[in-house]
Amino acid sequence: MGGRIASLLARFHRTDRPDRPAAAATPSPAEKTLTARGLADAIDRAMDLGLWEHAERIAQSALPLAPTSARLGERLARLRLAQGRPETALAIIDSPWARGERHASLRLLRAVCLVQIGRKEEAHSDLLRWSKKSTAPLDARLMLALLEWEASDDHAATLALLRNLKHLEDPRTLELLLLIATRQERPEQAQVWARRLRECSAFGGGSAHMHLLCDSLMRPQLRGQGEPTDEQVNMLAMELIAAEQVIPTLVAAQQFRPQRDVARLLCKAIEQALDDLTNRFHALEALARLALILDDRAEARRRAEEALRHNPMSASLAMLLEELDEKPQEAIDQPPQERAA
């Protein structure tokens, strides 16, 4: 495939020669489609492997074909977003040739770009209109709910998530509803969502993940125990290795309803399990957020910068580093002479 793509690309950059008719250098529509598809897949592979320079070289070769393929345009936009260039990614998505073919994944990508460049209200407005349609994907309502939750509008977030449940008993939607009920200190409602989450997990492969989430949120004996014991750390570390998908959700629960002893236990367990986890990025980001909960900003920055090397396109991580760049409120409120001391 690579050799064929290279030979086809050569035809886009070849100048006319006296011994070659001009028409022979013009690729057919079928060849353009094949080349664009191959380039899109090649960019995907390079990004998955972290080969950013190679991905950029492919992208430069792909630029002449971008207006002919929405798929290739989307990959180019994703690459620019991963490179920390959301404005460029948005410009690609908003190009005239892309507007008529903007499918769901490209529309979601546009919302991510808008959030990253500070146009959250525009992203929110589009997601709100879109999410009311029965054809909207679950991810659109999930993203809308997260924006509502960030704005502390739990009611609006819940409404968006409930629309998802009209279409499918989605575990991610139930997880977020469980977290909202937990933050609101509504234990009875939290139990309802936990029960539905357990039932949902019984029909899929994420059973351990779901049970660990429910147990961690509903387990009162974890609270008020001070320093975790080695036995507790070892037990939780083994559970996390078996169901590591739950780590971001457990950390989110601590962010919205902090329990320092639980956060400390979770932090130690993740550190112990780190070398055995397949998604190191999520684990490092979790450690950064837990360190912030535990008021260790230096450790939070160290872990966040380490995580950034694994996933440069993470919007949530960029927001975390922004938060770490801000001075803590107590340092701002402190008189100058005390800060100097």
Image (spheres, rainbow, N blue to C red):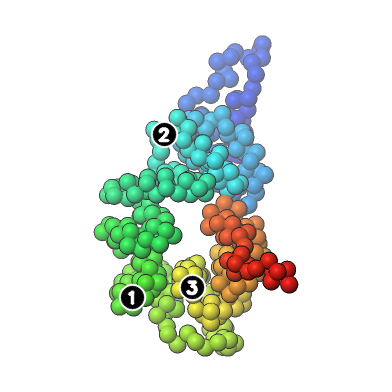
Q: Amino acid at mark 3?
A: Gln
Decide which of tag 1 and tag 2 comes sooner along the chain: 2
Q: Nearer the viewer, mark 2 or mark 3?
A: 3
Q: Secondary structure at mark 3?
A: helix
Residue identified by numbered label 2: 99
Taking the spot 33% from the left edge, 46% from the top edge, the residue there is 130
Secondary structure found at label 1: loop
Relative to residue 263, is residue 84 depicted above or below? above
Crowding at mark 1 (Cα within 10 Å: few <14, some 14-19, many 20+): few
User: Which residue is found at the position 50% from the left and 40% from the top?
Assistant: 90
Residue 265 visible in the snapshot: yes
Q: Residues within 10 Å of mark 3 (few under 14, many from 20)?
A: many
Tag 1: residue type?
Arg
Q: Which mark is residue 186?
A: 1
In the image shown, does 273 or 303 lie closer to the viewer?
303
Query: Between marks 3 and 1, how big is the CA–CA gap?
Result: 16 Å
Q: Are marks 2 and 3 in contact (CB under 8 Å)?
A: no
Determine the secondary structure under disc 2. Answer: helix
Q: Amino acid at mark 2?
A: Arg
Q: Position of residue 234 (x, y in %)?
A: 57, 83
Label 2 and label 3: CA atoms lie apart by 40 Å
In the displayed structure, 147 sits above or below 1; it is: below
Q: CA distance from mark 1 to mark 2?
A: 44 Å
